Image: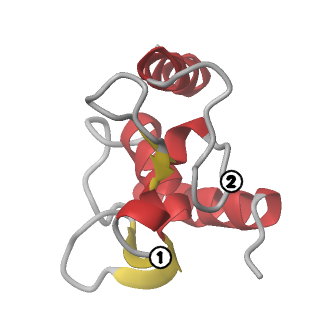
Amino acid sequence: MSPGVSLQLAINRQLMRLPHGASCARCGETCVLALMPSAVPGAVVRCYACTVRRWEDHHLGGRYEGALVVRVPGNQHRVLSVLQHIGWRGEHEPGSPYAVAFDRAALTGVRIAWPTH
């Protein structure tokens, strides 16, 4: 399955778990992959950053000895982890040139599309 199809499936699975038009009740975030579905129907929806913490470590190329670690906002980390999973996990080893290059490109794309203040 192509990465594009895998990403669309991940988004669709998340959409099925969220109420229509969901956004974070605290900050207004609307990125479907960043929102945390509630186990209780009708409960307030929060994004990952507002639920857990705002900044996290992201390992470019996965977790391996010598991994380059960058600090990213929690919601971006959640999206980067999904991209990592569908982009190379299961096909390439953590730390492989492909995994690191893919993650660097994903990080650049996410930062361009989703700038932080």
Q: Amino acid at mark 1?
A: Arg
Q: Between residue 64 and residue 77, name the one nearer to us.
A: 77
Percent position (x, y) of residue 68?
A: 40, 83
Q: Disc number at residue 90?
A: none
Sooner in the amino-acid sequence: mark 2 or mark 1: 2
Percent position (x, y) of residue 98?
A: 46, 54
The quarter of the displayed image where residue 56 is located: bottom left
Q: Is 92 placed above or below 114 here?
A: above
Could you tell me which residue is drawn at 40 percent across and 42 percent down?
Answer: 88
Could you tell me which residue is drawn at 54 percent across and 25 percent down?
Answer: 11
Q: Quadrant of the C terminus?
A: bottom right
Q: Amino acid at mark 2?
A: Gly
Q: Residues within 10 Å of mark 2 (few under 14, many from 20)?
A: few
Q: Between residue 116 and residue 46, name the one nearer to us.
A: 46
SS category of the residue bearing label 1:
loop
**Mark 2 and mark 1: Cα distance apart in space:** 14 Å
Q: Between residue 10 and residue 85, name the one nearer to us.
A: 10
Could you tell me which residue is drawn at 27 percent across and 59 percent down?
Answer: 94
Q: Disc number at residue 28?
A: 2
Q: Disc number at residue 54?
A: 1
Contact? badges 2 and 1 (CB < 8 Å): no
